[in-house]
Amino acid sequence: MINDKLSTKEIQNLLSNKQFFDIIVEDCVDSTNNIIKKMADDNAKEGLVVIANHQTAGKGRLGRSFYSPDEKGIYMSVLFRPDISFDKSILLTTVAALSVCKAIKEVLCLGTKIKWVNDVLIDNKKVCGILTEGKVSANSEKMDYIVMGIGINIEEPEEGYPIEIKDIATPLISENRQYGQENLKNKLVAKILDNLYFYYNDIDLEEEYIRYEYIPLSDTLGKDIEIIDGDSREEARAIGIAENIGLIVKNDNGIRTLYSGEISIRDRQK
Ligand code: BTN
């Protein structure tokens, strides 16, 4: 059992940029994304961060739930108000995945990969999922706000992971992965936020730069995959990463680019 408590003060102390983020730590919420969305609708400023020890209704992509047991993970959401169109908003999801990978490397010296679009993997299993939600402005094509939700599995609960995810989920800390754990959650959150700030403000969501960093971390590129659409499955090969982190796929039907949806890696079928 790791012995660190999420703390606003501790995270603030560790942050390089102390101005941009306004951090709230909650014990238990339904979903940190829901909390931020409500606050965004009430005109909250960008840079607002809500982190919880526990979520009772954590949300995943494609209408799924995200298992969020008490004190066993980091469940955080960040509010952005970027001046970008809906198409470009996928870049923020990518930036979240890159920020998590870098933070894990910086804090724990541990390598990670990204399964397209945004699942962070260790040893081929998912350690972090990202759910980006947003609202398009009523008067333009631009986004009014984007909520970036990041869920990281830190420790496996004593009872183990639920059956639906036990073959695909992994915690950051386990029997074979025991590293410097002191203050781990606060350190990771601070690094993730610093990295997000870098991509968002310093790099200004520069598409080429983000793609340049994403490609070496891709777990999907060059692999045989299945494109999943409801009950249907289509085999293809992932041959490239296009603009806005689209996945270029090739099969007998030709070459096309996917911008959203779900895939599985064929030799793993996860
Ligand atoms: C996925 O893997 O499908 C995405 C999971 C995203 C989970 C995070 S936890 C913090 C934030 N609040 C939520 O309800 N979901 C995201």
Image (tube, rainbow, N blue to C red):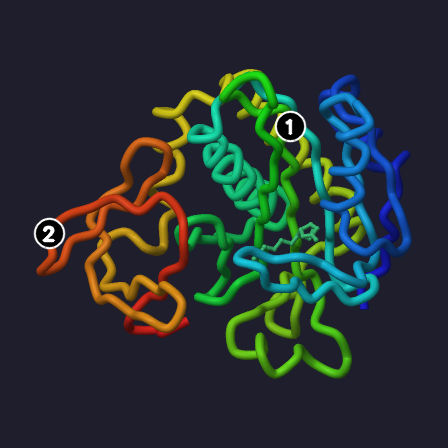
| Kind of element beneath mark 2 | strand
Residue 252 location (% of width, % of height): 9, 60
Of the two numbered discs 1 and 2 on the same chain, state the one appearing first in sequence.
1
User: Quick one: quadrant of the N terminus?
Assistant: bottom right
Residue, x 59% and y 48% (percent of image)? 131
The answer to whether 72 appears left or right of 116 in the picture is right
In the rendered structure, which amino acid carries the disc numbered 2?
Answer: Gly
Q: Which of the 4 quarters of the picture holds residue 214?
A: top left
Q: Which residue is mark 2?
A: 254
Residue 47 vertical placement versus 149 (above, below): above
Read off the residue under disc 1.
Answer: 145
Q: Decide: is 37 above or below 202.
A: below
- Which numbered dot is residue 201? none
Q: Residues within 10 Å of mark 1 (few under 14, many from 20)?
A: many
Q: Is residue 62 left or right of residue 56?
A: left
Q: Residue, x 48% and y 23% (percent of image)?
A: 85
Cβ atoms at labels 1 and 2 below 8 Å apart? no
Mark 1: C-beta under 8 Å from nearest atom of ligand 1: no
Label 1 is placed on what type of residue?
Tyr
Mark 1 and mark 2: Cα distance apart in space? 36 Å
Spot occupied by residue 23 in the image (x, y as percentages of width and height): 83, 33
Residue drawn 36% across the image and 38% down it: 245
Q: Position of residue 185 (x, y in %)?
A: 76, 49
Residue occupying the point 67% across, 59% down: 179
> How many residues crowd mark 2 within 10 Å: few (<14), some (14–19), many (20+)?
few
- Residue 116 x/y as whole percent: 39, 51
Q: Quadrant of residue 25?
A: top right
In the displayed structure image, the side of residue 49 where residue 86 appears, left or right: left
